Amino acid sequence: MKQTNDGDNNILVQSANVDLGDNFPDYAKTNIRQVASKYFGHLSLASVHVTREGITYRCTVNMQMGALKMMSGEAKDKDLYTAFRAALQKTAKQLRRSKRELREDKAERTDKDMLLREGNAPLRSERQSEGVPFANDEDDFRAAAE
C-alpha cells in the first residue's frame, strides 16, 4: 500500500495496488482543500483511498470538518480522476447539507409540517369529530369549500 501524507492539513492519499503517479496526490489535496474552505474552513482530517477493481477504479473520500461527524463519498469509474471527482462531489453534498442545517440565520417555518413536528396540530380524528372535513387532495378541498 502506497501512501502520501500532507502533515499541515492532515490529508492522506492512499492506494492499494494502484500507482497514483506524482500528480494525483497533489490534485486530490488541492481539491479537498478547496471543498473544505468552501463549506466550513477547518479541515480536521481527510483521506482518499483508491483501489482497482478490474478495469475500474474505486475511490473513497472521507472528510471531517471541525467537530462534525465524518462525511464519506465513494464512486467507481474507468478514469481515476473522474472517480475521485464524483466521490468528492458526494462528500461535498453532505457537507453542504450539514452547513445548511447548522445555519442560524435560516427562517422559521410555520407551515403545517412545523406544526406537526411540534405536536400542536390537531389530529385527523380530532378534526373529524369537530365536524371539520379532512381534505386529502385538491378535489376534497373544492368539495369542502362548496
Image (tube, rainbow, N blue to C red):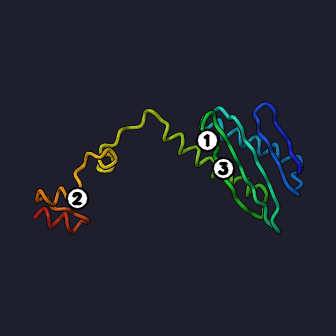
Q: Residue 9 occupies which quadrant of the picture?
A: top right
Please rate how many residues cluster around mark 1, counting C-alpha atoms within 10 Å: few if below 14, some from 14 to 19, many from 20.
Answer: few
- Disc nearest the viewer among 1 and 3: 1
Q: Amino acid at mark 3?
A: Ser
- Disc nearest the viewer among 2 and 3: 2
Q: Residue at x 53, y 45 (%)?
A: 97
Q: Which mark is residue 93?
A: none
Q: Residue at x 25, y 65 (%)?
A: 136
**Marks 1/3: CA–CA distance:** 10 Å
User: Label 1, on which residue?
Assistant: 69
User: Label 2, on which residue?
Assistant: 124
> Considering the numbered disc 2 on the image, is that residue within a helix, a strand or a loop?
helix
Q: Residue at x 64, y 43 (%)?
A: 70
Query: Is 76 positioned to the left or the right of 4 in the image?
Result: left
Residue 66 vs 126, above or below: the answer is above
Please rate how many residues cluster around mark 2, counting C-alpha atoms within 10 Å: few if below 14, some from 14 to 19, many from 20.
Answer: few
User: Label 3, on which residue?
Assistant: 72
Query: Is 92 positioned to the left or the right of 18 in the image?
Result: left
Q: Residue at x 11, y 56 (%)?
A: 130
Please rate how many residues cluster around mark 3, counting C-alpha atoms within 10 Å: few if below 14, some from 14 to 19, many from 20.
Answer: many
